Image (cartoon, rainbow, N blue to C red):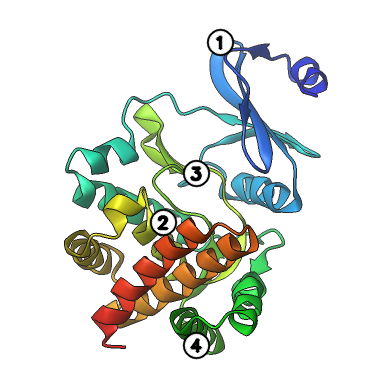
């Protein structure tokens, strides 16, 4: 599977194969430089690869080459890790780093963006789940989503899957994003998934949730009530995906996040 690309781009294998749900990745070297070779398995990953190339290293890993399903990009070799920072009591710092990276990704570019999925399309799974489920909190998440989608503010090119594992330490280049989904819509969406990560045991603690809310609203300059609505909408969407997979434990976890946001809104 990788042989063609290794030969085409004169690459040497430099680590173990990494398999994800939708892609396969292989650490490689090119003239001694550490890179990552990624093969997309679904259209979403192909769209994300095109978006990575569009960002051209500004806020995201630099793309070296892209062709068909293959993406060759710089590899994160730094020793810092946002998930470890959170577990070591540096959640504020991790949240600020994530917000700064998102801000870079959202900056306007002068050149045409690649084809993107709209947030309205993205939320189709939540609409379906609301129709099939009798969960009142999930229905409320659906209401919040439709309110946001019907009157969007500050629409930008979105990463679509911002979390602590998708922003990595690239040493001198700083913290950069990987693995975008390629969406378009209101910028608040990209901040919402932060509140569901890196682990539910951390994210569902009310004091931590409220502190993150304060840090993100201040760093991202986003209105608190609007962000709470996006947290509910995204938690509902994520819960809908878990319902599709019959994963009731993770569904309940996302609903716990939605409940924290709903309580803070007085719903």
Asked if 261 appears above or below 93 in the picture, the reply is: below
Q: Which residue is mark 3?
A: 60
* Residue beneath the point at 68% across and 47% down: 45
Q: Which residue is mark 2?
A: 102
State yes or no: discs 4 and 3 in contact (Cβ < 8 Å). Answer: no
> Percent x, y for residue 93?
22, 47
- In the picture, which quadrant includes the N terminus? top right
Residue 32 badge: 1
State yes or no: discs 2 and 3 in contact (Cβ < 8 Å). Answer: no
Asked if 148 appears above or below 222 in the picture, the reply is: below
State yes or no: discs 1 and 3 in contact (Cβ < 8 Å). Answer: no
> Percent x, y for residue 186?
49, 74
Residue 116 in sight from this viewpoint: yes
Q: Earlier in the sequence, mark 2 or mark 3?
A: 3
Q: Nearer the viewer, residue 13 or 137?
A: 137
Q: Secondary structure at mark 2?
A: helix
Q: Secondary structure at mark 4?
A: helix
Is residue 91 toward the left or the right of residue 51 in the image? left
Q: Earlier in the sequence, mark 2 or mark 4?
A: 2
Q: Residues within 10 Å of mark 3 (few under 14, many from 20)?
A: many
> Percent x, y for residue 122?
63, 69
Q: Earlier in the sequence, mark 1 or mark 3?
A: 1
C-alpha gap between disc 2 and disc 4:
26 Å
Residue 143 badge: 4
C-alpha gap between disc 1 and disc 3:
21 Å
Viewer-nearest of labels 4 and 3? 4
The total of numbered circles placed on residues is 4
């Amino acid at each position: 599977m990788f042989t063609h690309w290794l030969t085409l781009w004169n690459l040497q294998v430099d680590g173990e194969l990494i398999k994800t749900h939708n892609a396969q990745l292989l650490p490689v070297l090119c003239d001694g430089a550490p890179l990552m070779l990624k093969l997309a398995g679904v259209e979403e990953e192909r769209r994300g690869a095109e978006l990575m190339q569009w960002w051209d290293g500004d806020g995201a890993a630099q793309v070296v080459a892209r062709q068909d399903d293959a993406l060759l990009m710089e590899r994160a070799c730094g020793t810092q890790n946002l998930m470890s920072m959170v577990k070591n009591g540096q959640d504020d710092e991790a949240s600020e780093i994530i917000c700064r990276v998102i801000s870079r990704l959202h900056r306007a570019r002068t050149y045409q963006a690649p084809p993107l999925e709209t947030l309205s399309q993205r939320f189709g799974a939540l609409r379906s789940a609301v129709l099939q489920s009798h969960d009142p909190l999930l229905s409320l998440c659906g209401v919040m989503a439709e309110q946001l989608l019907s009157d969007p503010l500050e629409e930008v090119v979105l990463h679509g899957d911002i979390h602590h594992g998708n922003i990595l330490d690239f040493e001198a280049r700083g913290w950069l994003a990987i693995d975008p989904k390629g969406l378009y819509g209101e910028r608040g969406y990209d901040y919402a998934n932060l509140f569901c990560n890196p682990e539910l045991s951390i994210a569902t603690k009310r004091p931590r949730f409220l502190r993150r809310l304060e840090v993100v609203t201040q760093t991202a300059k986003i209105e608190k009530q609007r962000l709470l609505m996006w947290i509910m909408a995204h938690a509902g969407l994520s819960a809908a995906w878990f319902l599709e997979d019959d994963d009731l434990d993770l569904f309940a976890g996302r609903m716990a996040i939605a409940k924290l946001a709903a309580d803070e809104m007085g719903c």
